[in-house]
Image: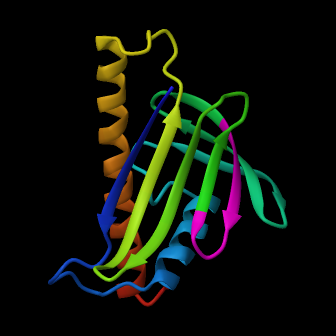
Amino acid sequence: MKTVSYTLEVNPEGVEPVLTAEHIWTGLEMKANNALPFVPGMSRCDVISRSDNGLLRQISLPTGDYEERITFFPPVQVQFERVGSDGFIQNTISESEKGLWLTFTFSVPFAGAVEGSDEERVQVNEMRGNYIAAVVSTLKKVRELVSDGEL
């Protein structure tokens, strides 16, 4: 299993509208409930049950069908755990003297790949590309929602 993170500056110079941490948090909650507008390639996202601090959902990605337990740690982090697997994904909002940041961390097993092998490196790089696209598309969708007055 490999763990990879990707952090993106939320409000680089010249990008409008400027997003707040509250905008990002609300967008992450929306994404947990229905990821289809936020995640390229996802074809199904059905919430099965809800709890005080999260939900259980079934999703379909090009790599397969999964059940995910989502836990909210407001207003900073959303964690996605694949049921029946050791993998997890975290979406974390942070602020520094340089501004607002959104980090996606994924730690997932790569079935059939020997740790440290070329095959595993290829799979990690493919997954990294997918998660970079997910960070970018999540911020793009939140920006659209703010621009449209929906958030």
Q: Which residue extends farthest bottom?
A: 149
Q: Which residue is drawn at 31% across and 50% down?
A: 133
Q: Is residue 66 left or right of residue 109?
A: right
Residue 41 on the magenta segment: no
Establish if 149 lies above or below 15.
below
Q: How far across and how far down the image is residue 121, in percent?
A: 31, 21
Q: How far across and how far down the image is residue 93, in percent?
A: 48, 70
Residue 76 on the magenta segment: yes
Q: How far across and how far down the image is residue 65, in percent?
A: 60, 31
Q: Residue at x 37, y 71 (%)?
A: 101
Q: Which residue is drawn at 44% across and 54% down?
A: 104
> In the image shown, does 62 or 134 lie closer to the viewer?
134
- The magenta-colored residue range is 67-77
Quarter-of-image position of residue 126 = top left
Q: Which residue is drawn at 75% across and 60% down?
A: 54
Quarter-of-image position of residue 62 = top left
Dominant secondary structure, magenta = strand
